[in-house]
Image (cartoon, grey):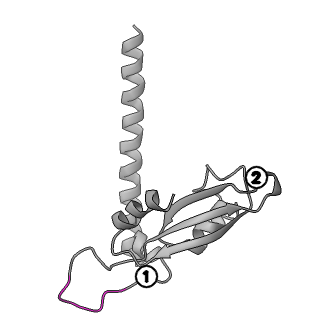
């Protein structure tokens, strides 16, 4: 009987995520019809644009950065956090709680200061591969 309930709960969870995905797609379609851009690329205020039309791969299409934060709280002196972002100014605001969502792990040791920001990566994968090296 217990396995049946687990299956039923998992089925309900999967169904709800599928419904959420459908709702998001419908919302994007409605916004696109109205002329509002809702793609993640448009959220970045300073994207690095590719000048050469010959290169039409994924490289060079955006801003990808790896960053290091230190806690300014005297109680947590010396605590650091490393992360990845496409918009450093928005991300530090999320870590410090000025923007509501996106920074659960750094909630307890606020406020944070961005000490280091490494950018200029061609892809998000290359920026994420640098993160363990910085540690």
- Residue at 71% of width from left, 57% of height from top? 78
Q: Which mark lies nearer to you, 1 or 2?
A: 2
Picture layout, residue 41 above or below residue 21: below
Q: Is residue 97 magenta?
A: no
Q: Are marks 1 and 2 in contact (CB under 8 Å)?
A: no
Q: Which residue is found at the position 29% from the left and 92% from the top? A: 51
Question: Label 1 belongs to which residue?
Answer: 47
Magenta range: 49-55
Residue ID for mark 2: 76
Image coordinates of residue 127 in percent, x first then y, are: 40, 67
What residue is shown at x 20% (from left), y 81% (from top)? 56
Query: Magenta stretch mostly in which secondary structure?
Result: loop
> Would you call the spot at circle 1 few (<14 residues within 10 Å), some (14-19), or many (20 or more)?
some
Q: Residue 25's image quarter? A: bottom left
Task: Determine the image quadrant of residue 63.
Answer: bottom left
User: Upstream in the sequence, badge 1 or badge 2?
Assistant: 1
Left or right: where does residue 135 sit relative to residue 99? left
Front-most of residues 120 and 55: 120
Horizontal side of residue 119 vs 29, given as left or right: right
Q: Is residue 117 above or below residue 1?
A: below
Residue 54 included in the magenta stretch of the image: yes
Q: Is residue 29 visible?
A: no
The residue lying toward the viewer, choosing from 71 and 58, is 71
Corner quadrant of residue 121: bottom left
Disc 1 is placed on an element classified as loop
The location of residue 74, given as percent across then percent down, is: 82, 57
Q: At x 34% / y 70%, what residue is drawn? A: 123
- Provide residue 50's location: percent of width, then percent of height: 31, 87
Residue 76 visible here? yes
Residue 19: horizontal and vertical position, in percent? 38, 44
């Amino acid at each position: 009987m217990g396995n049946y309930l687990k299956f039923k709960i998992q089925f309900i969870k999967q169904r709800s995520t599928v419904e959420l995905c459908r709702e998001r797609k419908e919302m994007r379609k409605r916004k696109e019809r109205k002329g509002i851009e809702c793609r993640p690329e448009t959220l970045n205020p300073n994207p690095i644009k590719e000048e050469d039309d010959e290169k039409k791969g994924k490289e060079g299409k955006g801003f990808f950065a790896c960053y290091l934060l230190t806690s300014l709280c005297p109680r947590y002196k010396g605590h650091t956090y490393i992360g990845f972002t496409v918009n450093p100014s928005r991300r530090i605001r999320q870590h410090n709680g000025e923007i509501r969502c996106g920074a659960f792990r750094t909630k307890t040791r606020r406020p944070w200061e961005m000490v280091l920001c490494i950018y200029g990566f061609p892809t998000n994968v290359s920026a994420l591969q640098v993160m363990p090296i910085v540690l």
